[in-house]
Structures are given as structure tokens and as C-alpha cells.
């Protein structure tokens, strides 16, 4: 099997996994939130439910951002590309978009590096947060999310060049 075919299969697997984790997390957030509201009406709410929901929302923010980058729907300042498109300068728009993806990949990679340092500190000095889950596991969402986001920016950057050659 060619290396490009293997990379494409891995990329497709990661995209599908991202969607599945988003769907599961969103379902858990919705169910947990409804359950929490119902339990409050009867005066009984487990202490672990709301922190779990908060951390799932945090995970969803990173994964949703990665999905937005994959579809080119992330937050972007579109004034300069819009002006260039109106002047029929598509090549300049292409390079400007690639520059944005490259910078996004660098920034999220740096974020991942410092998030990893924070995670290591939390492993050393953290404590059990709720349900016996160590706080470092919860903080691990940050470097994991930043790595996934950086991967999305890099993939978008590379796919643009591959698609341009076709």
C-alpha cells in the first residue's frame, strides 16, 4: 500500500473518530444537563455531574474548533481575501489562506507544548477531582485538544496543495 493511501485512510479514520466523539460528548452534555436540572427540582444533585459537564463542554470546544478548521468555517478575518477576490486575484487569496492555516498550526502547536507542560505539573501536584478521576486527566483535555486542532490546521494546509495539483 502506498504511503499516501495509508495517510488518507488514517486521516479519514481520525475525521470519523472526531465526529463520533463530538456526537457522544454532546449527547452526554445534553443528557447530563437535563438530568441535573431534574434532580435539582427534587433537591438531589450529585456533586460530580456539573464538573463533568463543564469538562465535556471544554472538550467539545476544542473538537468543534478542529471540525470548523477541517471545513474551513473557523473564525477568520475575511476583509483582505474579499477585496482580493473582487479584483480577481485568486492566487493571492490562495496564498493568504495558506498563510493563515500555517500561522494557526504554529500557534496551536505552541499552545499544545505549553498545555503539555501544564499537564505534567498537574500530574505531579494534582489531586482527585471527582469520581476518583485525577485532575491531570481533566487537564489533559487541553493538550489533546490543542494537538487535534494543530493537526486540523496542518491537514487543511496540506490538503489545499494536494487539491490544487488535481
Image (cartoon, helix red, strand yellow):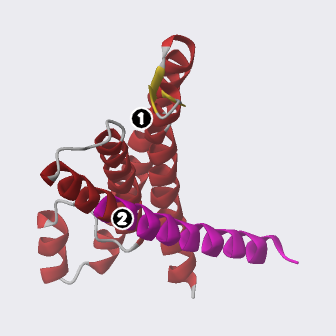
Question: Extreme top residue here?
Answer: 125
**What secondary structure is found at the residue carrying circle 2?**
helix
- The crowding category of the residue bearing disc 2, from other C-alpha atoms within 10 Å (few below 14, some 14 to 19, many at least 20), is some
Q: Which residues are magenta?
A: 1-30
Viewer-proximal residue among 46 and 84: 46
Q: Is residue 126 above or below residue 42?
A: above
Q: Is residue 32 above or below residue 147?
A: below
Residue behind mark 2: 26
Q: Locate residue 24, reporting x and y percent.
A: 45, 66
Does any portion of residue 122 appear in the rendered image? Answer: yes
Q: Locate residue 62, reporting x and y percent.
A: 38, 52
Does any portion of residue 95 appear in the rendered image? Answer: no
Question: Extreme right residue here?
Answer: 1
Viewer-proximal residue among 104 and 14: 14
Tell me the CA gap for discs 1 and 2. Answer: 24 Å
Say whether disc 1 or disc 2 marks the residue closer to the N-terminus.
2
Q: Is residue 18 magenta?
A: yes
Q: Locate residue 21, reporting x and y percent.
A: 49, 64
In percent of the image, x 44 and y 49: which residue is there?
A: 105
Q: Quadrant of the C terminus?
A: bottom right
Viewer-proximal residue among 63 and 74: 63
In percent of the image, x 38 and y 74: which residue is there?
A: 71
Residue behind mark 1: 111
Q: Quadrant of the N terminus?
A: bottom right
Indicate which label's residue lies in the foreground, 1 or 2: 2
Q: Quick check: marks 1 and 2 in contact, CB under 8 Å?
A: no
Q: Locate residue 61, reporting x and y percent.
A: 32, 53
Q: Is residue 1 above or below residue 28?
A: below
**What secondary structure is found at the residue carrying circle 1?**
helix
Q: Is residue 56 left or right of residue 138?
A: left
Amino acid at each position: 500500500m502506498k504511503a499516501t493511501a495509508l495517510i488518507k485512510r488514517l486521516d479519514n479514520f481520525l475525521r470519523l473518530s472526531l465526529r463520533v466523539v463530538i456526537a457522544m460528548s454532546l449527547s452526554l452534555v445534553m443528557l447530563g444537563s437535563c438530568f441535573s436540572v431534574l434532580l435539582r427540582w427534587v433537591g438531589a444533585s450529585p456533586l460530580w455531574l456539573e464538573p463533568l459537564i463543564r469538562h465535556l463542554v471544554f472538550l467539545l470546544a476544542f473538537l468543534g474548533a478542529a471540525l470548523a478548521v477541517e471545513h474551513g468555517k473557523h473564525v477568520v478575518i475575511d476583509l483582505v481575501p474579499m477585496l482580493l477576490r473582487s479584483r480577481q486575484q485568486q492566487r493571492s487569496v490562495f496564498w493568504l489562506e495558506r498563510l493563515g492555516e500555517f500561522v494557526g498550526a504554529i500557534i496551536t502547536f505552541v499552545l499544545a507544548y505549553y498545555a503539555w507542560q501544564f499537564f505534567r505539573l498537574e500530574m505531579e501536584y494534582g489531586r482527585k477531582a471527582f469520581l476518583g478521576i485525577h485532575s491531570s486527566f481533566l487537564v489533559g483535555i487541553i493538550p489533546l485538544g490543542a494537538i487535534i486542532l494543530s493537526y486540523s490546521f496542518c491537514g487543511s494546509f496540506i490538503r489545499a496543495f494536494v487539491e490544487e495539483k488535481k
